[in-house]
Amino acid sequence: MRIEEGETRSPPVEEDDTSPGVVETRYFRFAERESDRLLLDSGRRFGPVTVAFETYGRLNRDASNAVLVCHALSGDAHAAGYRDRKGNDPGWWNDAIGPGKAFDTDRYFVICSNVIGGCRGTTGPSTIDPETDQAYGLDFPVVTIGDMVEVQKRLLGYLGIEKLLAVAGGSMGGMQAIEWALRYPDASRAHIVIASTARLSPQSIAFNTVGRSAILSDSDFLAGRYYDSTIPYRGLSLARMIGHITYLSDESMETKFGRRLQEGENFSYDFKSEFQVESYLNYQGSKFVERFDANTYLYVTKAMDYFDVARYYGGGSLEKAMERVKSRVLLLSFSSDWLFPTAQSRDVVKALSRLRKDVTWVDIPSSYGHDAFLLEMETESEIIRAFLSATESWEAAP
Amino acid sequence: MTKLLKPGGGRADLSFIADWIDRGSSVLDLGCGDGELLAHLARGKGVRGIGVEIESARALSAIRKGIPVLQRDLDEALSYFGDGSFDTAILSQTIQELRHPRDTLREILRVANRAIVSFPNFGHLPLRLQLLFHGTMPRTRALYWQWYDTPNIHLMTVRDFTSFCEEEGYRVLERHYIRGGRVIDRLPFPNLLSEGCIALVTAKN
């Protein structure tokens, strides 16, 4: 999902027996007829919708081994495997999905789809509106995390899956997992919520709004109709740079960059990118622009801003909202994550504990900040594997 | 019960504690270790349990057994639960390691109707003799640490525990003793002769 500097080349697919191999993104289209339109949380009806998705592993005979993986802000349907036999373009959670990994594709059928409003194959603001033959741009309806879940629900129907083994995701993917637990409590036996929250904090809304302001104030933004001209490069890359600051931690920046200069040892006494941390952020910003749509950034961050399940399901009370939960819930948080800090997971755990729901929580010590959920794979995988495997036998018991 | 009972009895104490737990009841296991007890209770008695375990390898083992686990500090985890959330809480061989045993036990008996508390008896005769004749901090099979690395910061005797319960207004519903790694119902001079004690206490009248 996030591209590390000097991206490591993956081994050729044949040599990597922990990978689902070469995978192709598939597409499912629905809500083409007026009567079949998607009813959005905003009250608007919308369609048609194309969903980009990938699957890994095999669905078993009674369709009971399906795991839905939900991606974060900048992710997509390509969660695992590679694009070609040379091992190019590994999925954003390739470390977690594959034979013997956290989501063991020898045992589970793993599904990942791009969210509605996205720009990686699923219908979003960059999609051509069939009524105008132009990209939707800002005419695209504002969507919520709940709407993302509705789209995933339709996809599961298409795939013939009535009950999932688990819904799992980190960050915004974790929000979708929580939403699933509340919107469709019977649709999954377990929910795995990683580095996430039941309610976006004002601090996170603040970061999102600065990111959006950067895009909106870019003179190339053209009220979202930039698809035929120059894209709002500066705005989007700036938004990404801000985002990246929130994904790291003070300690991880200290370790990764320190105060080191990109070149030489002497200050240049000008405003060129000079410190390593500067060049890292610039690199992340410009890399991101190549593969991500500025309008999608607006829509998806807005969906996160609106996320507050206490308000939506509990009249302001998180505990009331959590009464709906019927599944086993696993929460993982990371000690140095200040974007979705431990305390926000604790709020969910508290609410579930008070209701004596089946809740497991591990706060994993890490210095990586929010990014830890993509990096602390060893610890994370062990816990997820243990939890999933217990969940399988758990419902078999009387 | 791991630490104290491992040498002699292992599983014996599991079924012993299980006898005090009603079928289908709810149990909070504080310091649940690898979740063996809760798994045993879930299988055998349909008990709905939650474990609290701070040590990550043990918590992982409990997760693997399908036990809901909070990997938190015991005092913090207790604060998550409402009054009378559980039929029984289990505090096995841990009370002597708590920083504020009195406050924690109050919390335990707030969230649970009854608590099973087990602890090593510092009044055990060999301990007294070691202190008397050697003049050093006593060490036994149950209390095998040195004074400087022991996690046991609030050691007590059976008699201490009895008067503590009286002061706090707790009723001791049942009490058994540990000797030779086994649980026994009756023992003369338990404060001298028992290695440890398991008690079922409640704050209710």
Image: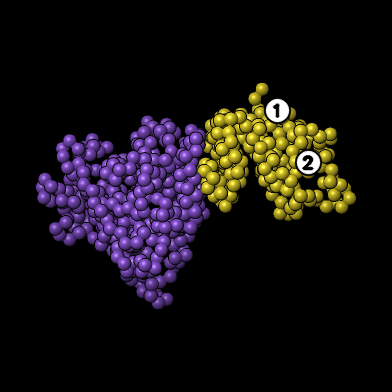
Badge 1: chain ID: B
* Chain B colour as displayed: yellow
Q: CA distance from mark 1 to mark 2?
A: 20 Å
Q: Name the residue nearer the viewer: A120 or A172.
A: A120
Q: Is residue A202 visible?
A: no
The quadrant in which residue A140 appears is top left
The chain coloured purple is A
Q: Which residue is mark 2?
A: B179
Q: Position of residue A6 (x, y in %)?
A: 36, 69
The kind of secondary structure element at disc 1 is: strand
Determine the residue positioned at 66% across, 37% down: B15
Q: Is residue A34 left or right of residue B199?
A: left
The kind of secondary structure element at disc 2 is: strand
Quadrant (top left/top right/bottom left/bottom right) for the N terminus of chain B: top right
Question: Label 2 is placed on what type of residue?
Answer: Arg
Q: Name the residue nearer the viewer: B185 or A117.
A: B185
The image shows residue A151, relative to residue A245, as above or below, that is above
Q: Which residue is mark 1?
A: B173
Q: Residue furthest right?
A: B133
Q: Position of residue B170 (x, y in %)?
A: 69, 28
Q: Position of residue A332 (x, y in %)?
A: 46, 48
